[in-house]
Structure formats: structure tokens, C-alpha cells
Amino acid sequence: MAKRITIYLAGLFVAAFGIALVIMSAVGAGPWDAVAVGLNLHFGLTVGLWSILSLLLFTLLTFLIEKTRFRLESMVPIIIRGAFLDFWLYGVLRGADFASSPALQWTSFAAGLLLIGAGLGAYMEAGFPKTPVDGLMVAVSGRTGWSFSSARMLIEGTGAATAFLLGGPVALGTLLTALFLGKIIQTVNAKTKTILQAQRLHEQRT
């Protein structure tokens, strides 16, 4: 249990760090993060808080697709990740300038995208509640037979359109996130699953 909790919290912490780097790279935030930034620009509050509030919608969509109970527990990782995101944006990275040069911008973006994918891909295997976006990704994949990558592309594309309408930071980085984040998540998730399965077999033998 302790190992699973560590993987869960570490994954969300790393993912939040990646999101902060991508936002601060100023080359286009991830689609649904751009929605949160757009709402922050228009209405105040923190980006992390808007991330929590805006993603409530996904809990409802997952409920409608899976036709099971309303998964209130999916708000647990959203609240944790939102708090971690504000910790990075308004605490550790406050005042940092990742947009001073194109090289620094794209380095920050690339590192952030990899960290988001790695964090989300790992935390999903901890066996605890998933964020509404990730829960919806799994639900869409299960209902349609699509891969995580394809399901994520659909979800992120919808987010990009919403962020554009809100005047959020939609740019090339947003498109790249929509195209590649799902693939990174799927790769890390598969490797994490393999590692955990190997550890379980080892523990059973010893």
C-alpha cells in the first residue's frame, strides 16, 4: 500500500511540475491547462483552482459513458494535482523566466511534456482514483476499443477548441501536446505496469 501511495503522489507531483513548465514556456499550454489559464486571465483565481473546477465536467462525462455511479473520488487527484500545480507556479517557479529565448522555451516545453506523460503514466497504475480526464480517457478507450493515445487525442482536441474560444494560450505547443501526450502516457504506463507485475511476482516467490 505504501508503495502504491508513493507512486500515486509522486506521479501527480511530477505531472504538475511538467504542466507548470509547459505553461511557463509560453509556446502553448496543454489544451485543458490552456482552458484553466484562460479562465484565470478572465476571472482571477489560481490556475490550479480553475483546473479543479473546469475538470468537474469530465466526472460527469465519464459517468454518462460508463453508466455507472457518479465517481466523486475522481476529484481527489484533481484537488491534489491542482494544489501541486499552484505550488509550482506560485511558489517554486514564481518569477522564473522560461520564455527569454526560443531555445529555453522549447527545452522547457519538451521537458514539461515528458514529465506530464511520465507522471500520469505512472500514477494510473497505482490503483487509486484517476483524474476525470484520465478516467474519461480510459472510459472512451474501453467503450470504443481505441488506444489510450487515440482517446487522449480526441479529449485534448476538444480542450484546444474550448481554450481557443476562451482566449487561452493556444499555440503550437498545444497541438504538440494533443498529438503526443497520449503516446507518452501509454508508453510509461505499459512500462510501469510491467515493473509492478515483476515486483508482485518476486514478492510472491519470496
Image (cartoon, rainbow, N blue to C red):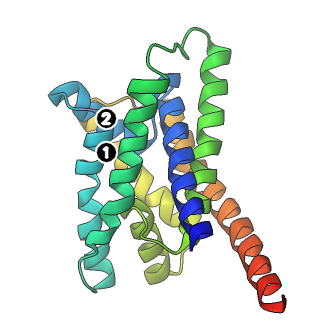
Front-lying residue, 60 or 83: 83
Which image quarter holds the C terminus? bottom right
Label 2 belongs to which residue? 47
Quadrant position of the N terminus in the picture? bottom right
Q: Position of residue 85 (x, y in %)?
A: 42, 39
**Residue 123 visible somewhere in the drawing:** no
User: In whole angstroms, how far apart are the C-alphas of marks 1 and 2?
Assistant: 6 Å
132 or 1, which lies in front? 1
Extreme left residue here? 43
Q: Residue at x 33, y 44 (%)?
A: 161
The residue lying at 50 percent from left, 57 percent from top is 153
Whether residues under marks 1 and 2 lie with C-beta atoms below 8 angstroms apart, the answer is: yes
Give the quadrant of residue 76. bottom left
Residue at the disc numbered 1 = 51
The residue carrying pointer 1 sits among few (fewer than 14), some (14 to 19) or many (20 or more) residues within 10 Å by Cα, namely: many
Please tell me how crowded label 2 is: few (under 14), some (14-19), or many (20+) other residues with Cα within 10 Å: many
Q: Amino acid at mark 2?
A: Val
Q: Is residue 19 left or right of residue 47?
A: right
Q: Tell me if residue 33 comes above or below residue 142 in the rendering.
A: above
Q: Is residue 125 left or right of residue 38?
A: right
User: Quadrant location of residue 197?
Assistant: bottom right
- Residue displayed at 64% across by 17% down: 104
Quarter of the image for residue 169 reads top left
